[in-house]
Amino acid sequence: MYDMSASLIFLEPVGYVLVARLLWHDLAHDLLSYWISALFLSWLFGLITNRRFTLCKPEEKAHSQWLSLKYFHASLCSISMTAGSMLVMLTDASTTSILVVCMFLSMASAITSIIYSAVRGVLALYNAMIWLPMSVMLLMRDDEFLMTLGIGCLVCMAAMLLIGQRLNQYLIAGFDSRVAHSQAVQKLATSKSKLEKALIATRGLAFRDELTGLYNRRQLWTRMEQEQARSEAMRHPLCFALMDLDHFKQINDQFGHPAGDVVLKTIAQLALEEFRDRDVVSRYGGEEFAVILPKTSLSEAESSVQRFCKRVAEAHIVLEDSPIQTTISIGVTQYRRGEQIKDTIARADQALYHAKRKGRNQVMSDFDVLNGLTSLDEVTIRLDKD
């Protein structure tokens, strides 16, 4: 509330001028000038303090120096106000002048109840210092009207304190409500972020292989359909390669399945490093991997997978000080316009089968397939036997 009271602060000089005009003919001009000057000085200090408080960072507003400045400003203002009541009461001013000062104090007290409602100590100090001297001096007069006015001043002080306390309660309640709302919003934002991450992770599990992090077989078919449509529309070449680790069962038997998992993850990482960003690398199943090579001719695809075959053979995989050597056989083919995807994959599978038959650790394309294999059914039969 304090840092939003600039408009109220600028109303104070208007009250000073009005009071000076009403008391001008009843009080000594020099004393009245001194009093108004003191009021203006306290107002100027309050204006500067308010401005600095408004511009400071939110986390700095609760600092003890600001609380000290508020107490000092309240004391300065209350002393200036008390000087006015003393000036009127000790110079035997008229009843009209006394009423004017009381009205002025009421206005100042009301404004202060708003400005300092957030700090009950400052509010109590201010009201006590401006009302108690005035009330005591009025109660000590023999005039019944002035005594009644003194009682009214005490009632006004109690009312201002009560109003300030109520405003303080509303302010604290509103602050607590804003804090609770802010915390609730923060919790919702955190929960939303966690849910989004969980959703992304869940979606990733739907098309990623859990062990290697590569695309799974389902996603491979989806991407192959996309690349097929793009190849048909743009008329650019599209190649597909199937890769199978040689003697992988022996690795599992000799070193254990954890070692086999390490080999699979290592091969997956090598594939991601070797192939281009636009190529789609996936785990086809077991120890088999597959690569979609968009915008790539068969000769270019053969060169690419040949480099990968060589890199796998040269890779040194060490598990618990035991070196593991492995190789890979690869079959590659080019998509033929208008054919079904399963036919493309079958030709790559056929080429892979012949790479295995001819000694493993090599690359073969469907054009390298032996003339003795004339049908895909024959390839399937031989693969089952193998």
Image (cartoon, grey):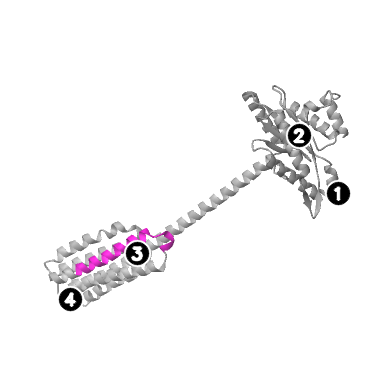
Residue 111, quarter of picture: bottom left
- The magenta-colored residue range is 35-61
**Residue at left 83%, top 35%?**
356
Counting from the top left corner in percent of width and height, residue 248 is at 82, 43
| Residue type at tag 3 | Tyr
Determine whether the residue tagged by mark 3 lies in a helix, strand or loop: loop
Q: Which mark is residue 379?
A: none
| Residue type at tag 2 | Leu
Residue hosting label 3:
116
Residue hosting label 2:
242
Whether the magenta-drawn stretch holds residue 37 is answered as yes
Which numbered mark, 1 or 4, is in the foreground of this view? 1
Residue hosting label 1:
254
Q: Is residue 183 above or below residue 291?
A: below
Residue 294, quarter of picture: top right
The answer for how far apart the CA atoms under marks 1 and 3 are is 81 Å
Counting from the top left corner in percent of width and height, residue 78 is at 28, 70
Determine whether the residue tagged by mark 4 lies in a helix, strand or loop: helix
Q: Residue furthest right?
A: 385
| Residue type at tag 1 | Gln
First of labels 3, 4 by sequence position: 4
Counting from the top left corner in percent of width and height, residue 127 is at 30, 69
Labels 3 & 4 near each other (Cβ < 8 A): no
**Residue at left 22%, top 61%?**
13
